[in-house]
């Protein structure tokens, strides 16, 4: 199942910014569209659409592209800043997932590669669920429920957490979050992805890259 970001003016602006950053990073490496598509494990058409800001890629697709480029997801959703201190004001986070039930997955902060830490603010409407494919080896996730109840399936017995409960689990296997209750649920999620760029998206064709498009 694919989960798309909400289509509004802010999402369009975000999509264009992500596309420009992906193209910048790709061209800086001398990579063709086909090369990035192969390294990320997505179609060439998807890369074209992302770079043009014409696509609403799933979080999984963005992770594949960011890992292939070796920059980490946070680097794709914000403009480069020279200062080491970064402040995200309320409402300025990047909404990368939304649902018809009012759910939101907002990336509010993150660090640069190689050891990437992401901080997310998630809301799940009643009946909402979000399935995540396995992240890169060694990824860890930390979750704390702020309101409502959240059921986490991290590959073992699903666990239901209530407000104030917290959980740590490996993110390098498929997992999901669900709101099985009748009221909205909110949780804060921290994701640690080590070694981004150390083995992801390495050049499978070291003898030559072709002409950058």
Image: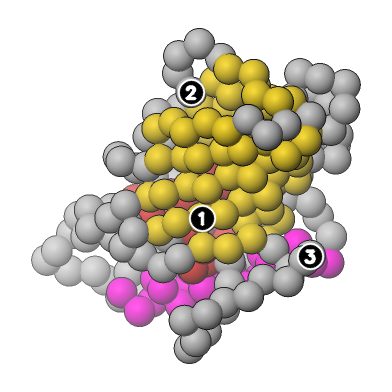
Query: In the picture provided, is 198 more to the left or to the right than 173?
Result: left
**Residue at horizontal 40%, vertical 32%?**
170
Q: Which residues are magenta?
A: 9-29
Query: In the picture provided, is 164 more to the left or to the right than 113?
Result: right
The answer to which image quadrant residue 171 occupies is: top left
Relative to 80, residue 77 above or below: above
Q: CA distance from mark 2 to mark 3?
A: 29 Å
Residue that lies at the very extreme toward the top in this rendered image: 157
Q: Residue 67: image x %, image y %?
A: 38, 55
**Element marked by disc 3:** loop
Give the class, few, some or many, for how many residues have Cα within 10 Å of label 1's Cα (few <14, many ≥20): some
The one of 212 and 10 positioned closer to us in this rendering: 10
**Which of the colour schemes (rainbow, by chain, secondary structure, one colour) is used?**
secondary structure
Nearer-N-terminus badge (1/3): 3
Q: Residue 38: image x %, image y %?
A: 34, 50
The answer to which image quadrant residue 65 occupies is: bottom left
The one of 151 and 200 positioned closer to us in this rendering: 151
**Residue at horizontal 23%, vertical 58%?**
198
Q: Residue 209: image x %, image y %?
A: 24, 69
Give the class, few, some or many, for how many residues have Cα within 10 Å of label 2's Cα (few <14, many ≥20): some
**Residue at horizontal 72%, vertical 31%?**
163
Asked if residue 190 can be seen in this view, the reply is: yes
Asked if residue 135 can be seen in this view, the reply is: no
Give the class, few, some or many, for how many residues have Cα within 10 Å of label 3's Cα (few <14, many ≥20): few
Identify the mark at residue 118; answer none if there is no mark: 1
Q: CA distance from mark 1 to mark 3?
A: 17 Å
Q: Would you name the residue on which mark 3 appears? A: 91
**Residue at horizontal 48%, vertical 47%?**
191
Identify the mark at residue 154; answer none if there is no mark: 2
What kind of secondary structure does the magenta stretch mostly adopt?
helix
Residue 40 counted in the magenta span: no
Looking at the rendered image, the quarter that the C terminus falls into is: bottom left
């Amino acid at each position: 199942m694919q989960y798309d970001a909400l289509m509004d003016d802010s999402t369009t602006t975000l999509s264009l910014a992500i596309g420009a950053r992906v193209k910048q990073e790709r061209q800086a490496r001398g990579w063709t569209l086909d090369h990035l598509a192969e390294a990320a494990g997505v179609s060439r058409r998807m890369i074209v659409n992302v770079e043009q800001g014409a696509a609403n890629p799933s979080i999984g697709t963005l992770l594949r592209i960011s890992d292939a480029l070796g920059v980490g997801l946070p680097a794709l959703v914000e403009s480069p800043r020279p200062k080491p201190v970064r402040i995200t004001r309320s409402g300025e986070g990047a909404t990368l997932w939304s649902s018809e039930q009012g759910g939101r997955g907002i990336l509010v902060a993150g660090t640069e590669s190689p050891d990437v830490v992401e901080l997310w603010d998630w809301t799940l409407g009643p009946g909402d669920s979000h399935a995540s494919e396995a992240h890169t080896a060694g990824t860890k996730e930390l979750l704390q429920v702020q309101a409502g109840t959240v059921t986490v399936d991290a590959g073992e017995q699903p666990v239901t957490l209530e407000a104030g409960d917290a959980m740590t689990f490996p993110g390098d296997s498929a997992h999901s979050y669900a709101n099985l209750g009748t009221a909205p649920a909110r949780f804060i999620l921290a994701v640690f992805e080590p070694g981004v760029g150390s083995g992801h998206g390495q050049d499978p064709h070291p003898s030559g890259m072709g002409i950058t498009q």
